[in-house]
Amino acid sequence: MKIKFLGATKNVTGSKFLLQIDGKNLLVDCGLFQERELKNRNWEEFPVDIEKIDCILLSHAHLDHSGYIPKIVKDGFSGKIYCTYPTSEITKIALLDSAKLQVEDAEKKRKRHQKEGRKGPYPEIPLYDVSDAEKSFHLFEPINYNEVVEISDKIKVVFYNSGHILGSSLIKIYVNGKEIVFSGDLGREGSPLLHPPEIIESADILILESTYGDRIHEEREIAIEKLENIINETVKKGGNIVIPTFAIERAQEILYYLKKLLIEDRIPHILTFLDSPMAIEVTEVFKKYLSYIDGEAEKIIEKNISPFDFPLLHFTKTVEESKMINHIKGSTIIMAGSGMCTGGRIKHHLISNIEREESSILFVGYQAKGTLGREIIEKEEVRILGNYYKVRAKIEKIDGFSAHADKGELLKWLDGFKKFPEKLFLVHGEEETIENFAETIKKAHTDSEIIIPSYLDEYEI
């Protein structure tokens, strides 16, 4: 058995892991690289023979785990894509949205580069288009949690709830008496929307995400109080609250907390825009799969009340509606994608607000190194759609809404193993974070081999 690491190695995007088992090739996740310095990998020749991949095991719908699927199908993959029912529906929405952005961004960059006299092959060629995305849809094979999938006589796979986003999964592979576990992205306890990650009691080999392996999130109540204060302070100054929002799970959770604050009369009742067609569609999927929802929201749902709707909330589906937002006088809350500001409508709202001292830009999710979101947090001037802007708006960051387990939660989840893995591969984290997390694990589990793979590394397992 071999495992080859095709992404998410010492970085947090591009999750792809090839398992070669008993003559079968299983690709676990199929994500896009999203960091600026790594994006070109998406256009490079795929490092393994695509036509020999038998199936894809998809942990969840986020594009850094699913966004490369149309490209791999376009280039010859024709196997099944196994995932949960919500993941199947949300991924299709995400891929269509990604395809539209690929085409739009490529055309904008082509025109800009032509005007500037520059030539750059990768940014000007869309990775795939809407028709490519749609061609992948018939390959999806949705399954339930805890359902056994037989890949062959010797290989069985089970998906368990990972508590990260709706339908997200831990993936356990049984083969030749061995157990291989992929964590996907691990969620947290105490989510108002989702069940906590399922405990896995045994694994010989574990591939574990490490996004927040070196830090502890603030408490949710502190995060909610921060959200309240930021809104109130910004409204007093007459500015807008711009929230770069991940369309899947984060948008729905922020809507839930805004509704909570409004019910408790802790924030002013101002116009609020969910300016993301994708987030709007995903919210409808949440409403469809209410059985997957847990926590505080479950009590609201039992009263036949939507946890995601409130007065003065507007869903803006068209580009025209989106443009109109920036002509509104007075304070508004604007939620738009993408969450790391790598594309989408958020860029236009940033242009309208980033140089306004009275406005606030509020980050409620992880900002990977090399993304525009990270640059806004760290720099005094940033480049957006080809032009440079001074960062004069108030920049705020709330970690308490993260859908990723933090250091303490990861260690607590690891404590659930009755049989600790012989080998543990740490992925999906920045290099320094992973190294620190590896040292922490080694202190408690001296008999386990902790490995930090690099891009395209291959290991016998």
Image (cartoon, grey):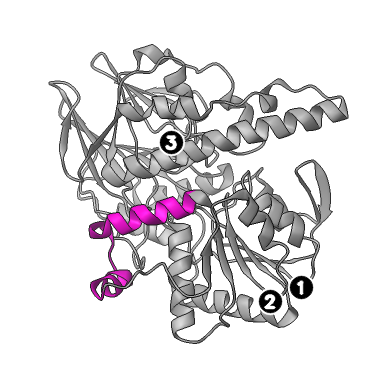
- Residue 337, given in percent of the width and then of the height, sits at 57, 51
Q: Closer to the camera, 32 or 329?
A: 329
Is residue 64 visible in the rendered structure shown here? no
Report helix, strand or loop for mark 2: helix
- Which span of residues is magenta-colored? 278-303
Name the residue carrying label 2.
234
Residue plotted at (68% across, 59% down): 324
* CB-based contact (under 8 Å), mark 1 and mark 3: no
The correct choice, above or below, for 14 with respect to 318 in the image is above
Please indicate, yes or no, whether residue 293 appears anywhere in the rendered image.
Answer: yes
> Which amino acid, by three-letter code, is at mark 1?
Glu
- Label 2 is placed on what type of residue? Thr
Residue ID at (50%, 87%): 265
Answer few, some or many: residues within 10 Å of disc 2's Cα (few below 14, many 20 plus, some between 14 and 19).
Answer: many
Q: Position of residue 88 (x, y in %)?
A: 32, 40
Q: Which mark is residue 358?
A: 1
- Where's residue 384, x and y in %? 75, 46
| Quadrant where the N terminus is found in the figure | top left
Left/right of residue 374 with respect to residue 317 in the rendered view = right
Of callouts 1 and 3, which one flags the residue occurring earlier in the amino acid sequence? 3
Residue 66's disc is 3
Q: Position of residue 174 (x, y in %)?
A: 19, 32
Is 8 inside the magenta-drawn segment? no
